[in-house]
Amino acid sequence: MIELVERAAAWAEELRGETAPAQRRRWGQYFTPPSIARFMAGLCAARHGASIRLLDPGAGAGILGIAAAASLLARGAQTVELIAVEQQARTHARLERSLARARAELGPRLQARAVRADVLELPAEQVAPGRVDLVIANPPYFKMPPSDARGGRSPNIYTRFMEVAARLLKPDGELCCIVPRSYASGRYFEGFRRSFHAAMALERVHVFASRRAAFRRDGVLQENIIVRYRKRPSARESGAVLVTSSRGAEALEASARLELRRDEILDPADSSAPFLLPTSAADRALLALARRWPGTLATLGLEISTGPVIPFRAREQLTRAPDQEAAYPLLWMQHVRASGLCWPLGQAFRKPEYIRASAPAKLLVPRGDYVLLRRLSSKEERRRLIAATLERERFTAPRIGIENHVNFIHRPGGALRVTEARGLAALLNSRLLDRYFRMASGSTQVNATDIRRLPLPASAVIDGLGRRAVTASARELDAAVDALLRAGSPRAP
């Protein structure tokens, strides 16, 4: 199998060299490295003596489908019918060469055919719904507008591939794919998670610790995961999920392993909820402890909103020269630091740090106490959550501008207490809550929806932490949050 997979990978590499990077990005085309193809092939359940219909949608040069077919035959399958679907003409020609070589080497037990078609509009005469035993896929990924009805209604082509796969599978059939982790959380994929997890049971997840690991050569910074689902009507039933993790794409078989109950990852009462991905016993313990906290922003009477100032739309309202006209402070993501709000940054900062007092009221927030939270973290940044308090006494201006890459926590119709704001910022900056958030979200974006779902302690605890934050160091606050988690108590520290 190894030589066959390596040969298909070599043809994929030729295609990669012949295709401009911009074109590959437009197609969302990233060829599977051989080590990952072999690993995914090994995840497919062996069916000794069975005849298996295998689908590789968006097959590229055929590396995944060939790896899976060879692995299944080696593990005792009677025959494998491989259907490899590829839309791009040049790639399809290479795919046919790959399949011809696979048939020659694997013999008559492999029946393989290449189909040139759009998987999202695959004719039933090519592959009928409910007739496939196994789908193995490395789908493309790029955003799709709701007006594009192909394949389903989810907001990215890779999740539409997953929807199509679910329809084509037989009951108890398997889907094994390498995809971005973005569908696991966030508001945009809620509808997809709801429908998909109602029909498909998660059984296996592999997590790459490095964002660059899976497709390093193509400069892909998506956090990718490998998942295996089984088509079951009662997908919410209890069961085990094996989570493995590795730094990169090599030595995958030596990955760290953690077996969990499905209800530890997926909320059985809400199939649209994000699914959490702990990768160690310490992560598992942290999940159990955090779930003992009774609150969320909503139960505390709080809301999180996105800064209303979108710079390119409000360009005429922004200014660098507050001495020449009435202007209010404008806070950008770069001003928000775990050590506190750092404003102004002065000449070293190339963006305007003020907004005109004459700007529309909808672009400004009243002076008050808030928690500011960066909406983005950079590539491999150590922290995902970075928060700071904006305290009423920090500025004399009656209103403040908050740029769109900053979220802010506030109390609708009221005001945050300063101790409450400090306590929330200390929680969000803590090592443990940052780790919890990373388990819940693989995106560098810190979405308001995900923050709304974070478990939080009782109000009195947050106030107590806020009082302590005045004099405590970051390390001492980390220890206090750790103690709160382990106590699971509503008492103030």
Image (cartoon, helix red, strand yellow):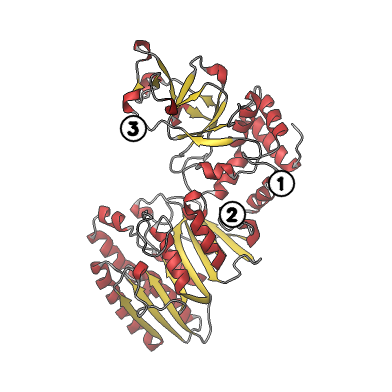
Which amino acid is tagged 2? Thr
Q: CA distance from mark 2 to mark 3?
A: 42 Å
The residue that label 1 is drawn on is: 292
**Residue at horizontal 49 percent and vertical 17 percent from the top:** 398
Q: Position of residue 454 (x, y in %)?
A: 61, 43
The residue that label 2 is drawn on is: 279
Q: Nearer the viewer, residue 77 or 351?
A: 351
Answer above or below: position of 491 versus 62: above
Q: Nearer the viewer, mark 2 or mark 3?
A: 3
In the displayed structure image, the side of residue 12 where residue 154 appears, left or right:
right
Q: CA distance from mark 3 to mark 1?
A: 43 Å
- Where residue 132 sits, quadrant-wise, is bottom left
Q: Nearer the viewer, residue 18 or 362?
A: 362
Q: Position of residue 256 (x, y in %)?
A: 58, 58
Which amino acid is tagged 1? Arg
In the displayed structure image, the side of residue 259 where residue 338 appears, left or right:
left
In this rendering, does residue 442 appear at all? Answer: no
